[in-house]
């Protein structure tokens, strides 16, 4: 049993380490956002936290949807069907764009209700712009995840 674990550890790490580093970089972007907002004051920090946390819900759902790109691409690669790669990527990009536009539109429509969540009027007012920008940034963000899923499974 331990021999098989040892034998598979190297190839698994060769696949996992680049993905782990990419996810670490993704997480560090949030650290940088918080650091930058913190320098603008506590109202800006609270507003960015409110907007980011509420936008996180549809964004993570979208990441789950476009995660299918890597699964389908890996299955086809394993089956030796390489000619389907462009179609899989195209479908992933269409899915990312369609879901991103719908989610961004709904999120943008909900932005006026930020003031009803119990935060101060100053925080809600500052959160509005950040919330709307983050909502529309879902579209390219999800397209990036589709591209990354396609590339990671190559």
Image (tube, rainbow, N blue to C red):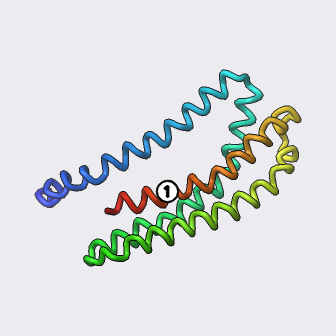
Q: Quadrant of the N terminus?
A: bottom left
Q: Is residue 52 above or below residue 95?
A: above
Q: Relative to 117, is 18 on the left or the right?
A: left
Number of callouts = 1
Q: Is residue 109 above or below residue 88?
A: above
Q: Relative to 142, is 125 on the left or the right?
A: right
Q: Residue at x 84, y 37 (%)?
A: 125
Question: At numbered mark 1, what does the secondary structure look like: helix, strand or loop?
Answer: helix
Q: Is residue 130 above or below residue 145?
A: above
Residue 25: image quadrant is top left
Residue 40: image quadrant is top right
Instruction: Name the residue that disc number 1 marks.
Output: 145
In the image, 48 versus 150, the foreground residue is: 150
Q: Relative to 136, is 72 on the left or the right?
A: left
In the image, 63 versus 91, the foreground residue is: 91
Q: Residue furthest left?
A: 3
Q: Position of residue 142 (x, y in %)?
A: 56, 57
Q: Position of residue 93 (x, y in %)?
A: 53, 65
Q: Position of residue 59 (x, y in %)?
A: 61, 55
Q: Residue at x 77, y 28 (%)?
A: 43
Q: Position of residue 99 (x, y in %)?
A: 63, 65
Q: Residues within 10 Å of mark 1 (few under 14, many from 20)?
A: many
Q: Quadrant of the C terminus?
A: bottom left
Q: Residue at x 60, y 63 (%)?
A: 97
In the image, 22 versus 144, the foreground residue is: 144
Q: Is residue 86 above or below residue 108?
A: below
């Amino acid at each position: 049993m331990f021999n098989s674990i040892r034998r598979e550890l190297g190839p698994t790490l060769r696949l996992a380490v680049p993905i782990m580093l990419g996810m670490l970089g993704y997480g560090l972007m949030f650290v940088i956002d918080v650091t930058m907002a913190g320098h603008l004051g506590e109202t800006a920090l609270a507003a960015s936290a409110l907007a980011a946390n509420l936008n996180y819900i549809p964004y993570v759902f979208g990441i789950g949807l476009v995660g299918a790109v890597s699964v389908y691409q890996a299955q086809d690669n394993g089956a030796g069907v390489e000619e389907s790669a462009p179609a899989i990527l195209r479908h992933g990009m269409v899915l990312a764009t369609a879901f991103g536009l719908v989610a961004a539109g709904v999120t943008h429509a909900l932005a006026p209700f930020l003031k009803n969540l119990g935060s101060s009027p100053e925080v809600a007012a500052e959160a509005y712009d950040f919330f709307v920008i983050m909502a529309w940034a879902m579209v390219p963000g999800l397209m990036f995840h589709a591209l990354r899923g396609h590339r990671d499974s190559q």
